[in-house]
Amino acid sequence: MRETIRSLRIYFFISGAVSVFVNLEPALAAGNAFQYRALAAYGVAAGLSLLAAGFIARTAISEKSERLLRILYFGMGYVLANLAATVLIVGASAGAIRLVLPLLVLLYLRSNVIRLSTESYASADPVAA
């Protein structure tokens, strides 16, 4: 499926909102261990950065796609840190399976950001045509 900038922005908004919603309560819960709260706070930050990416996606695709890629790598870092913590602390691979979907979504977004920015550069550069 070929994504447009508009649908890519919607993906960013939905991914960011889900990440903030899922991680906000564990980040603020007093009964959780510090490491768990810190990881959840990282998830909230990743979600907020994805929401911000949705707002800047239109201009960032045509000007500097590196910003969006950094935000996506930040989100992937959160997912991988959460995956490592889940496997090491809990030891359950079943809990780790639910983390594969966000990683796949972020990889999908990354490939579309690269494709759209390449198309944007090609259409804006008359020498490349």
Image (tube, rainbow, N blue to C red):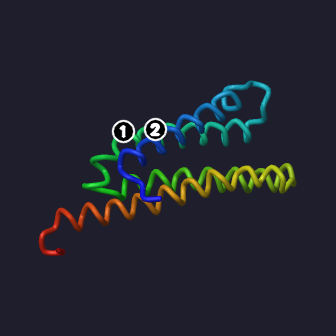
**Residue 51 disc label:** 2
**Residue 27 disc label:** none
Q: Position of residue 119 (x, y in %)?
A: 29, 64
Tell me if 58 is positioned left or right of 129 in this view: right
The quarter of the displayed image where residue 44 is located: top right
In the orientation shown, which residue stands out farthest toward the front?
1
* Distance in Å between CA atoms under marks 1 and 2: 7 Å
Helix, strand or loop for disc 1: helix
Placement of 12 over or under 107, stated as above or below: above
Q: Residues within 10 Å of mark 2 (few under 14, many from 20)?
A: many
Tell me if 3 is positioned left or right of 19 in this view: left
Placement of 28 over or under 111, stated as above or below: above
Residue corresponding to mark 1: 55
Q: Amino acid at mark 2?
A: Leu
Q: Position of residue 15 (x, y in %)?
A: 54, 42
Marks 1 & 2, CB-CB < 8 Å contact: yes
Q: Amino acid at mark 1?
A: Phe
Tell me if 48 is positioned left or right of 53 in this view: right
Q: Pick whichever, 49 or 39, lies toward us.
A: 49
Residue at figure coordinates x 84%, y 53% from the top left: 94
Residue at figure coordinates x 73%, y 39% from the top left: 36
Residue at figure coordinates x 63%, y 30% from the top left: 24
Quadrant housing the C terminus:
bottom left
Residue at figure coordinates x 37%, y 45% from the top left: 6
Q: Position of residue 17 (x, y in %)?
A: 54, 34
In the orientation shown, which residue stands out farthest toward the right?
91
Q: Position of residue 53 (x, y in %)?
A: 41, 44
Helix, strand or loop for disc 2: helix
